[in-house]
Image (cartoon, rainbow, N blue to C red):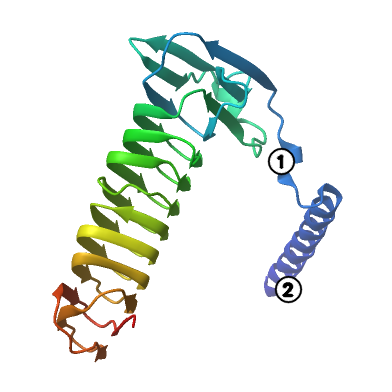
Amino acid sequence: MKQNEKKIWSIALVLLAIGLLIGFIGCCILGFDFRKLDTTEKQTRVYEWSQEVRSLSVDMNTTDLKILPSEDGKGKVVCHERENEPHTVSEQEGVLTIRCENRRKWYDYIGFTFGKTEVCVYLPQAEYEKLTVDIDTGDVFVASEMIFKQGKVETDTGDITWQAAVTEKLSLSTDTGDIEAKLQSDLADLEMETETGDIDIVDTACANMKIESDTGDVELKNVVVAGDLRIQTSTGDVELKDSDGATMFVKTSTGDVSGRLLRDKTFITRTSTGDVEVPKTQGGICEIVTSTGDIEIKIRK
C-alpha cells in the first residue's frame, strides 16, 4: 500500500513539473504579455456633443478613465470597449453622463479577459462645475489643464491620479488602489481615503486636508494647508517633506511619523513604546499620536 502511494505521489509530482514547464514555455512565447490571451472582441466608438457641458458623471466597471483637454476644441468621448460591454453617452441639462452597459452572458466569462478597456473624455473648455466618477477596478487620470468646482472619485482596486485644480471640494477614495495628487487649489477642501493603497501628494496648496488610510503609507511633499491638516492611518507610515498646516493632527497605530515642517509648531505628542524627537518651538498646534510608532519631526530653517 505504501509503495502504491509513493508511486502515485511520484507520478503527480512529475505531471506537476511538466505542467509548470509547459506553462513557463507558453509565457516565454507570449513575452509574458497576458493580454495576448484575451479572447473577447473589442471595438472603438467615438461620441461627440455640441451643447455646452458643465458637469460630468461617470459610472463604469473595469474600464480605465482619462479626462483630457481637447486638442481641436471639440468635445468627444472615445471608448475602447468590449463588444458585449458597450458604453452609453448622453447629455441632459448640461450634464454629460457616461455609463457601461454589461451585456455579457454567463458563457462570456469563460476564457481570458486580460486586456483592459479605456474611455478617454476630451473636454473643449477649461472650467466645469462637477466631476463624479464611480469605477470598480479601473484607473482614473484627470489632467492638469481643467478646473472643477467639485470633484468626487471612487474606485475599488483602481489607482487615482488627479492633477486638475479644484475651487471648492475634492474627494478621492479607493480600497486597494493608490492615490496621487498634485493641484493648486488654495480655497478647496481635500479629502482622500484608502484602505491598503498609498497616498502621495506633491506640490499642492489647499484650504483644509483630511487623509485616512489603513495599511497604506502617506507621503506629502511641498504641501501647504492654510487651515487644518488631519492624517490618520493604522499601520501605514506618514512622511511630511517640506509640508505644513496651520494646525495639524496626525494619528497612527504602528506607523512611524517623520518629516520636516515649514513653520514652528507647538508639539503635543503621545506614544506608547515609540521614540519621540521633535523641536521645542512655539507656533500652531501640531498633535501627533501613535501606539508603537516613532515620531521624528524637524523644522526647515
Of residue 76 and residue 71, the one placed in the foreground of this image is 71
Give the residue type that dot 2 points to.
Gln
**Depicted 231 relative to depicted 129: above or below:** below
Q: Residue at x 14, y 76 (%)?
A: 283
Q: Position of residue 186 (x, y in %)?
A: 29, 49
Q: Position of residue 296 (x, y in %)?
A: 30, 85
**Depicted 134 relative to depicted 211: above or below:** above
Of residue 101 and residue 8, the one placed in the foreground of this image is 101
As drawn, the residue found furthest toward the front would be 301
Label 2 – label 1 distance at C-alpha: 45 Å
- Which of the two labelled residues, at mark 2 and mark 1, occupies the earlier sequence position? 2
Q: Which mark is residue 35?
A: 1
Q: Is mark 1 on a helix, strand or loop?
A: helix
Give the position of the C terminus as an image quadrant: bottom left
Give the position of the N terminus as an image quadrant: bottom right
Nearer mark to the viewer, of 2 and 1: 1
Q: Where is residue 2 in the image (x, y as percent from the top left)?
A: 68, 74
Q: Where is residue 273 in the image (x, y as percent from the top left)?
A: 22, 89
Q: Name the residue under label 2.
A: 3
Using residue 22 as the reference point, say whether residue 220 is left or right of it.
left
* Residue 108 in which image quadrant: top right
Q: How crowded is mark 1: few (under 14 residues within 10 Å), some or many (20 or more)?
A: few
Give the residue type that dot 1 points to.
Arg
Q: Residues within 10 Å of mark 2 (few under 14, many from 20)?
A: few
* Residue 270 in which image quadrant: bottom left
Q: State if disc 1 and disc 2 touch (CB < 8 Å).
A: no
Q: Is mark 2 on a helix, strand or loop?
A: helix
Q: Residue 73 carries which label?
A: none
Residue 256 showing in the rendered view: no
Q: Which residue is drawn at 25% across and 83% down?
A: 292
